[in-house]
């Protein structure tokens, strides 16, 4: 049963990764080009990734978006990285 749960959890992370990867790539491209991206869009993407910090590919997407958005939205990125670390760092 435990293996089945882990398998489903990993399947969910793959779905999130597949869904968010092109969206994050597009947002990062816009930010790198100096284009405007609504802060709520970045929040929505980061929110979608927060529950999947156990998956390395999702963590990479999270870090990519944070790194790219940090210059324009420093407080937002700081808040999300702190929340992410608090949620996924072992004591």
Image (cartoon, grey):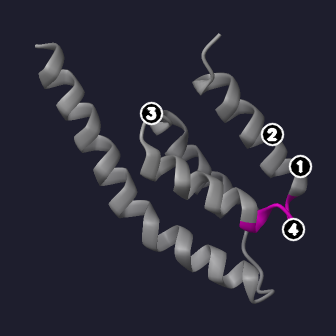
Name the secondary structure under disc 3: loop
User: Contact (CB < 8 A) between labels 2 and 1?
Assistant: yes
If you read the primary sequence from the N terminus, does the residue marked by circle 2 or circle 4 appear first? Answer: 4
Disc 4 on helix, strand or loop? loop
Q: Which numbered disc flags the more N-terminal residue, 4 or 3?
A: 3
Name the chief secondary structure element in magenta: loop
- Which comes before the other along the chain, label 3 or label 1? 3
In the picture, measured across the screen, residue 32 lies left or right of residue 26, that is: right
SS type, badge 2? helix
Residue wearing tag 3: 54
Could you say which disc has been placed on residue 4 in the image? none
Task: Name the residue tied to disc 1.
Answer: 75
Q: Residue at x 27, y 32 (%)?
A: 9
Dots 2 and 4: beta carbons under 8 Å? no
**74 up-or-down from 12: above or below:** below
Disc 3 to disc 1, C-alpha distance: 24 Å
Graded by Cα atoms within 10 Å as few (under 14), some (14 to 19) or many (20 or more), the crowding at tag 4 reads some
Quadrant in the picture for the C terminus = top right
In 3D space, how far apart are the residues under numbered discs 2 and 4 (Cα atoms)? 14 Å
Residue 27 coordinates in the image, percent (x, y): 62, 74
The residue beneath circle 4 is 72
Of the residues tagged 4 and 3, which is closer to the observer?
Answer: 3
The residue range painted magenta reads 68-73
- Residue 86 sits in quarter: top right
Residue at position x 74%, y 82% in the image = 32
- Disc 4 to disc 1, C-alpha distance: 9 Å
Q: Determine which residue is flagged by label 2.
A: 79
């Amino acid at each position: 049963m435990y293996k089945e749960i882990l398998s489903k959890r990993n399947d969910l992370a793959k779905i999130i990764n597949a869904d968010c990867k092109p969206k994050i790539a597009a947002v990062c491209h816009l930010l790198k080009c100096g284009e405007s991206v609504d802060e709520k869009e970045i929040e929505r993407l980061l929110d979608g990734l927060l529950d999947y910090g156990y998956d390395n590919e999702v963590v990479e997407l999270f870090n990519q978006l944070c790194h790219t958005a940090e210059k324009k939205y420093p407080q937002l990125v700081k808040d999300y990285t702190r929340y992410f670390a608090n949620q996924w760092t072992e004591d």
